[in-house]
Image (cartoon, grey):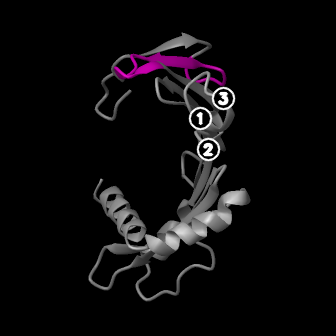
């Protein structure tokens, strides 16, 4: 159900019991998708709920799992996913289109840091992620701080490391194009904040 009480459009139970582990839901997928399925992995209101989404399009197929600890008083959100290129892609073409991601948001630490003006930043960033690809790894972190004039600001850090034999070549290439990458990253962060 949506917050206003209406049923989620085009979402229907296709297997298992509603809101029980193993329940499978299917939606009328977007025009470019061939299959979109939502599977309930855990449903324990006192400890954790978890759902997994499976999506296949002409360009990629992927799987994303979201787990919420202590749903009645949310303590943390964990997200894990894998993506790969189109079915049948093999060799380097297929390998270059694979990636995985894992993220965690400690909601208690986030709100503690976000509402105390002048407090020192937490020892560990409340929001962390790890993105992996055959050519490299990226680790973004987000740390909120209460702003003096109300609201809050978020410090974003991104660490990127190359992998494998192309790592030295990537480092040399980055020396020649340093400006567009930070601008693109900052632009993406600003757009995400606006949304």
The magenta span reads 18-34
Q: Nearer the viewer, mark 1 or mark 3?
A: 3
* Mark 3 Cα shell of 10 Å, populated few (<14), some (14-19), many (≥20): few
Q: Is residue 112 visible?
A: no
Marks 1 and 3 sit apart, C-alpha to C-alpha, by 11 Å
The image shows residue 37 at horizontal and vertical percentages of 53, 21
Residue drawn at x 40%, y 64% is 185
Q: Residue at x 61, y 42 (%)?
A: 96
Magenta span: predominant SS is: loop
Does residue 26 belong to the magenta stretch?
A: yes
Number of residues whose C-alpha sits closer than 10 Å to that of mark 1, classed few (under 14), some (14–19) or many (20 or more): some
Q: In terms of image quadrants, where is residue 178?
A: bottom left
**Under tag 2, what secondary structure?**
strand
Residue that numbered label 1 is attached to:
84
Asked if the residues shown at circle 2 and circle 1 are in contact, with their CB atoms under 8 angstroms apart, the answer is: yes
Q: Nearer the viewer, residue 165 or 59?
A: 165
In the rendered structure, the answer to whether residue 37 lies left or right of residue 98 reads: left
> Which residue has dot 2 on it?
99
Instruction: Name the image quarter holding residue 49.
Output: top right
Query: Which residue does the numbered mark 3 point to in the structure image?
Result: 90
Q: Is residue 115 left or right of residue 149?
A: right
Residue 102 location in percent, x, y?
62, 50
Residue 177 point in image, percent of width and height: 43, 70
């Amino acid at each position: 159900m949506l917050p206003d009480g209406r049923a989620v459009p085009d979402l229907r139970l296709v297997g298992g019991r509603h809101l029980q582990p193993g329940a499978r839901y299917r939606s009328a997928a977007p025009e470019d998708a061939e299959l979109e399925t939502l599977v309930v992995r855990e449903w324990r209101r006192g400890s954790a709920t978890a759902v997994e989404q499976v999506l296949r399009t002409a360009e990629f197929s992927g799987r994303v799992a979201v787990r919420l600890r202590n749903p009645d008083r949310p303590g943390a959100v964990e997200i894990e996913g894998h993506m790969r290129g189109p079915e049948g892609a093999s060799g380097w073409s297929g390998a270059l289109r694979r990636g995985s991601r894992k993220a965690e948001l400690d909601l208690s630490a986030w709100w503690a840091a976000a509402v105390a003006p002048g407090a020192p930043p937490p020892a560990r960033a409340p929001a962390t992620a790890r993105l992996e690809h055959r050519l490299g790894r990226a680790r973004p972190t987000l740390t909120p701080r209460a702003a003096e004039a109300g609201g809050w600001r978020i410090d974003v850090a991104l660490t990127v490391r190359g992998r494998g034999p192309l790592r030295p070549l990537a480092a040399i290439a980055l020396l020649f194009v340093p400006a567009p990458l930070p601008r693109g990253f900052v632009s993406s962060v600003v757009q995400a904040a606006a949304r």
